[in-house]
Image (spheres, rainbow, N blue to C red):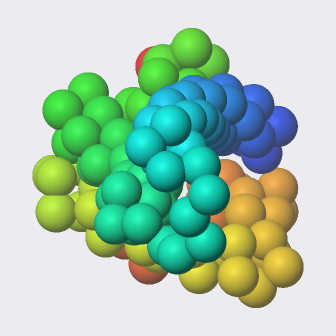
Amino acid sequence: MNYGGFWIRLGAKIIDNVITGAVGAGVAIMGGVSIGLTNPNSTSFPPAMIAVIAFQYLFPIAYTTFFLGKFSATPGKMACGLKVVTADGHSISYLRAFGRYFAEIISALILCIGYIMAAFDYEKRTLHDRICTTRVIKN
């Protein structure tokens, strides 16, 4: 297998973060404007804002799980010619894609050392790849 290296994976991650960030910002702006238009003098936390905040957390999970489960790659990975597979080269399931998203949080929480591991591993695996027994390969 031809593994995806650290820098190309970083590029794919940046693309995905721009996409999810733009969608999240759009929802936040629309939600904030609609909340402000309904009662601009309110100091309470309106229920609509709770929905906006929930979307901010849930959209990246759904985005990653859907694209990895359906196509073995997020749009960022597709743009960089990468895909996520099992150790034996098969597509990953939606459940593994879902778990991989949360394992990726662990990679980030430890000062991104989980991501940096890819630069030093012969199979270019990150911590979340090791946890979920996945590989990122060049398509």
Q: Is residue 59 visible?
A: yes
Between 34 and 38, which is closer to the camera in this rendering? Answer: 38
Give me the residue at 62% from left, 58% from top.
41
Let me know if residue 4 appears in the view: no
Q: Quadrant of residue 14?
A: top right
Q: Residue at x 24, y 40 (%)?
A: 66
User: Is 102 above or below relative to 80?
Assistant: below
In the rendered image, the vertical position of residue 42 relative to residue 94, given as above or below: below
**The one of 94 and 5 positioned closer to us in this rendering:** 94
Q: Nearer the viewer, residue 129 or 41?
A: 41
Is residue 33 shown left or right of residue 65? right
Q: Is residue 117 above or below residue 79?
A: below
Whole-percent x, y for residue 139 in the image:
46, 19
Residue 7 appears at what percent x and percent y? 82, 37
User: Residue 16: x percent and y percent?
Assistant: 58, 34
Find residue 119 and report its horizontal and vertical position in percent. Answer: 82, 56
Say which of 49 and 108 sits in front. Answer: 49
Splitting the image into 4 quarters, where does residue 17 fall? top right
Q: Is residue 81 left or right of residue 83?
A: right
In the picture, measured across the screen, residue 35 lies left or right of residue 110, that is left
Name the residue at 26% across, 27% down.
71
Q: Which residue lies at the image location 35% right of the left edge and 41% below the top edge?
A: 63
**Total residue callouts:** 0
